[in-house]
Image: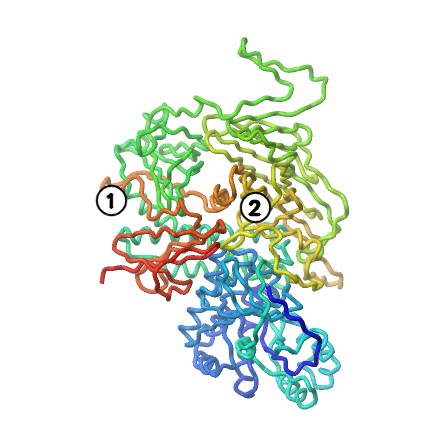
């Protein structure tokens, strides 16, 4: 790292970037914000034509697209002004967070924006402008570089001492970056630049500029604009008058113009790491809204994978437009705002966008999975296929859950042979036990079942068959169970209960891998790894931490009181050849709570599922505590396209604005992507999670599930002029799932981070009720296999243009490796970028490098 030593001097020039922060859902509903954007863009275009020294930035493309859809005749004017360089267009579709989305979502945000601007306006936007984003993922420099973005402007949390710096990604990619010390809104909110010159001078602009920029070693940048602010003619006139009166000159500029002015500056500081979110509470205060984007991303990935699979097998109707629309709906739904002036309608709009994205993807999934499943062999009329799809790049094993169905021949209700028993066999004819979760009878028989699967091909599928026979599910048990107060008399084959006049103790559950101790009074759960003999977790519990109200952004002041869950009962749900499940029932802060813990017969991991019946308002943080007592205390966690070793932050970063959580809290809180790991290089514990907010405090890991708040930014004003705060979250049942997987090797060698991807990219089970028996597919097949590597695939899809196919994966373990090059018959493979434009020979993979391969057809 290179440090620049400077002394404060008088500023000579400051670049002023006029723009509007184009929020969705903040100052109104989605349509209200977009229509306000129409006025803003129209006003900016008029001023650009009227004043040749004026410049303007349109920071997101979703507002630009809406404007052009409403006023198609304006395309030519925008194109002309963009060509002049005074109107800058953005390489970002929507103003999404960086710490919450997945890597693929961040990539699509750039891809769709760049393609739209290029296609409609013949411009290639290369500067990403992030106004009001409260955190930055450490891999964005690489994402930007691969998407043709060469420069970044930050407005929160950056390095105040070195605002112009080189930001380096985990893989070594570098991008020129600038952090605006004044923030994005100060000039517009406090400077009075939209009023006359005297009012502007009284607004304190000169003082703000002199105090914020401590060096004149290079020019600086500030904004004029705020949330849906429109540009005003007085701004232009005041800047002209200022430049006549003041020594420090203000230059209307764009981000690209600014970076051109500093392109020759040498010796810039190189900074590497994450800027943790200053608003991590977003997800836990909106458990009804924000966690929905994780299954959206999963569904889109599966939909693209199955559609590409079908394309390779002869179907030509790849749903390109449907998928792009679904991605764009998700991007708009992940805009960084909620619960403001738009009220409940705006939150509903936001949730509907995510649900539309997910449902659109699931419709495609069903269509493509049914096609493929219809092609697998059905050896006999009474052997009904169950096809299990795996979209990830490694061979998978685990428990699959889904439907199964049988029909008679020729009458669908002729299923007498199945009523006496049904067995499940794999494609090798081996009988596999299954748990019938739900059974439906009417016309025939349909079931929801859970069954163990193994050796599912990477990026492929495998078939099981339901047929008449015996299900061996009860021929063995997963756990030896010792219930407190009960003694087994093995000679008599019965159990007796001890005298009830005694203290209550613990139940224990032991399988081949773990010894689980459950305190029947407190509900505390301890986990011992039987293979190593080491205790891993001691007194794992659900805890409520009381606050003094608080909001979802910055105020999370605790009251000092904590409330553990109260347990009413511990019961064993089932104990068979697949799993042993136990349920703890009780309450947390007078709200019903159930914990379901699953130990498996064949898999060395534990699933924990919490369901909370939130009956708010409560000013509580509800947390799942994981007190790790094993060896080592290094904490790592997943981020988009990589991982971070805690704390892993950019030095001298993290701003101190009033609407950001205090630095002491921010230092511990992280948004973690799919998994968290604690331990050392030889042993440890990986915890997969279907939500993202964690508090990391030594070896104690706290997962935030729900956080109740007493107020939000906006208030309701009633007719009698009284104000009503809006509390969150709404009442309802919320579910949180974890996978606990120990490791007895390094994180890299064990690849235990895969458990996070497996939890959030579940296997897809498709039941087949019959075929024409002329199918063209085998009982199992895969497209490519990266199992022996440390790469994680995030997309397999049709290229944006032409008939090529695209595979994207990233190196997940932090070590240099060779990427196995998949071979697809009839295609040649090259390495490309996110924009799918470059072509060169694939080479070795740097630690945490994102690789995009493109398969071009050899058929002309």
User: How many other residues sit within 10 Å of disc 1, few (<14), some (14-19) or many (≥20)?
Assistant: few
At x 73%, y 83%, the residue is 201
At x 63%, y 55%, the residue is 280
Task: Residue 276: give x, y in percent of width and height.
Answer: 61, 57
Q: Is residue 11 left or right of residue 457?
A: right
Cα–Cα span, label 2 and label 1 = 42 Å
Q: Is residue 856 left or right of residue 124?
A: left
Q: Is residue 39 at least partly visible in the picture? A: no
Q: In the image shown, does 747 or 463 lie closer to the viewer?
A: 747
Residues at badges 2 and 1 in contact (C-beta under 8 Å)?
no
Q: Is residue 84 above or below residue 529?
A: below
Q: In the image shown, does 272 or 834 lie closer to the viewer?
A: 272
**Displayed quadrant of residue 830:** bottom left
* Quadrant placement of the C terminus: bottom left
Labels in figure, total: 2
Q: In the image shown, does 749 or 36 lie closer to the viewer?
A: 749
Q: Is residue 412 left or right of residue 263?
A: left
Task: Residue 419: give x, y in percent of width and height.
Answer: 36, 25
Q: Residue furthest top?
A: 492
- List the residue tagged with mark 2: 676
> Which of labels 2 and 1 is toward the front?
2
Task: Residue 152: give x, y in percent of width and height.
Answer: 54, 69
- List the residue tagged with mark 1: 776
Q: Is residue 778 above or below residue 294?
A: above
Q: Is residue 488 at least partly visible in the picture? A: yes
Task: Residue 676: give x, y in percent of width and height.
Answer: 57, 46
User: How many other residues sit within 10 Å of disc 2, few (<14), some (14-19) or many (≥20)?
Assistant: many
Q: Circle 1 sits in a helix, a strand or a loop, which is it? A: loop
Which of the two discs, 2 and 1, labels the residue nearer the N terminus? 2
Q: Is residue 307 left or right of residue 300?
A: left
At x 42%, y 30%, the residue is 434
Q: Circle 2 sits in a helix, a strand or a loop, which is it? A: strand
């Amino acid at each position: 790292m290179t440090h620049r030593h400077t002394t404060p001097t008088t500023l000579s020039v400051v670049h002023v970037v006029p723009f509007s922060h184009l929020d969705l859902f903040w100052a109104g509903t989605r349509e209200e914000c977009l229509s306000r954007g129409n006025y803003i863009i129209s006003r900016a275009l008029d001023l650009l034509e009227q004043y040749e020294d004026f410049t303007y930035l349109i920071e997101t493309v979703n507002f630009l697209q809406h404007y052009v859809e409403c006023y198609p005749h304006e395309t030519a004017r925008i194109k002309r002004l963009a060509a002049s360089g005074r109107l800058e267009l953005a390489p970002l579709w929507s103003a999404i967070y960086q710490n919450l989305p997945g890597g693929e979502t961040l990539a699509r945000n750039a891809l769709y924006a760049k393609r739209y601007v290029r296609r409609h306006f013949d411009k290639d936007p290369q500067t990403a402008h992030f106004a009001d984003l409260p955190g930055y993922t450490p891999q964005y420099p690489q994402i930007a570089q691969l998407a043709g973005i060469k420069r970044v402007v930050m407005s929160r949390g950056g390095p105040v001492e070195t605002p112009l710096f080189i930001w380096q990604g985990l893989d070594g990619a570098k991008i020129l970056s600038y952090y605006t010390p004044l923030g994005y809104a100060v000039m517009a909110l406090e400077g009075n630049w939209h009023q006359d010159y005297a009012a502007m001078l009284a607004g304190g602009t000169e003082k703000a500029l002199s105090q914020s920029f401590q060096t004149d070693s290079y020019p600086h940048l500030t904004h004029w604009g705020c949330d849906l602010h429109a540009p005003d003619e007085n701004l232009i006139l005041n800047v002209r008058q200022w430049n006549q009166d003041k020594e420090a000159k203000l230059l209307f500029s764009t981000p690209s113009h600014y970076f051109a002015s500093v392109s020759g500056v040498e010796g810039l500081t190189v900074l590497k790491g994450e800027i943790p979110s200053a608003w991590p509470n977003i997800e836990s205060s909106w458990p009804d809204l924000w966690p929905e984007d994780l299954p959206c991303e999963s569904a889109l990935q599966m939909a693209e994978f199955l559609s590409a699979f079908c394309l390779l097998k002869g179907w030509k109707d790849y749903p390109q437009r449907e998928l792009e629309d679904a991605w764009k709906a998700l991007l708009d739904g992940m805009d960084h705002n909620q619960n403001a002036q738009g009220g409940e309608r705006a939150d509903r709009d936001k949730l509907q966008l995510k649900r539309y994205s997910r449902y659109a993807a699931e419709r495609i999934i069903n269509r493509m999975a049914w096609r493929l499943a219809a092609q697998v062999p059905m050896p006999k009329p009474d052997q009904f296929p169950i096809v299990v799809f795996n979209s990830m790049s490694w061979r998978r094993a685990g428990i699959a859950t889904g439907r199964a169905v049988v029909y008679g021949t020729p009458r669908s209700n002729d299923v007498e042979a199945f009523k006496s028993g049904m067995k499940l066999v794999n494609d090798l004819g081996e009988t596999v036990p299954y748990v019938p979760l739900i059974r439906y009878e009417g016309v025939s028989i349909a079931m929801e079942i859970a069954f163990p699967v193994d050796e599912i091909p990477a990026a492929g599928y495998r078939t099981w068959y339901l047929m008449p026979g015996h299900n061996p599910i009860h021929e063995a048990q997963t756990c030896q169970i010792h219930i407190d107060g009960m003694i087994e008399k093995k000679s008599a084959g019965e159990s007796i209960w001890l005298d009830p006049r005694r203290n209550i103790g613990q139940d224990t559950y032991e399988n081949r891998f773990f010894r689980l101790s459950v305190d029947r009074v407190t509900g505390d759960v301890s986990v011992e790894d039987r293979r190593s003999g080491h205790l891993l977790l001691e007194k794992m519990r659900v805890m409520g931490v009381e606050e003094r109200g608080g909001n979802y952004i910055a105020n999370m002041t605790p009251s000092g009181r904590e409330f553990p869950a109260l347990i009413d009962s511990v019961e064993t749900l089932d104990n068979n050849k697949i799993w042993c499940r136990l349920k703890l029932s009780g309450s947390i802060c007078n709200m019903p709570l159930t914990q379901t813990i699953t130990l498996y017969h064949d898999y060395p991991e534990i699933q924990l599922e919490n369901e909370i019946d939130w009956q708010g308002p409560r000013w509580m943080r509800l947390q799942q505590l994981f007190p790790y007592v094993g060896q080592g205390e290094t904490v790592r966690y997943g981020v988009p396209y990589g991982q971070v070793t805690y704390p892993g932050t950019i030095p001298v970063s993290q701003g101190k604005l009033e609407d950001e959580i205090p630095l002491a809290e921010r230092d511990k809180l992280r948004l973690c992507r799919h998994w968290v790991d604690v331990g050392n290089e030889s042993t440890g514990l990986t915890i997969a999670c279907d939500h993202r907010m964690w508090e990391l405090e030594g070896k104690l890991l706290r997962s935030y599930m729900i956080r109740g708040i007493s107020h939000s930014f906006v208030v309701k004003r009633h007719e009698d002029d009284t104000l009503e705060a809006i509390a969150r979250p709404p009442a309802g049942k919320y579910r949180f799932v974890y996978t606990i997987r120990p490791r007895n090797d390094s994180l890299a060698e064990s690849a235990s981070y895969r458990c996070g991807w497996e939890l959030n990219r579940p296997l897809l089970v498709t039941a087949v009720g019959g075929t024409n028996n002329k199918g063209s597919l085998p009982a199992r097949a895969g497209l490519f296999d990266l199992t022996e590597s440390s790469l994680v695939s995030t997309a397999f899809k049709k290229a944006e243009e032409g008939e090529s196919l695209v595979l994207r994966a990233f190196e997940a373990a932090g070590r240099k490796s060779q990427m196995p090059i998949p071979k697809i018959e009839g295609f040649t493979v090259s390495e490309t970028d996110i924009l799918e434009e470059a072509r060169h020979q694939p080479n070795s993979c740097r630690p945490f490098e994102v690789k995009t391969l493109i398969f071009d057809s050899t058929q002309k």
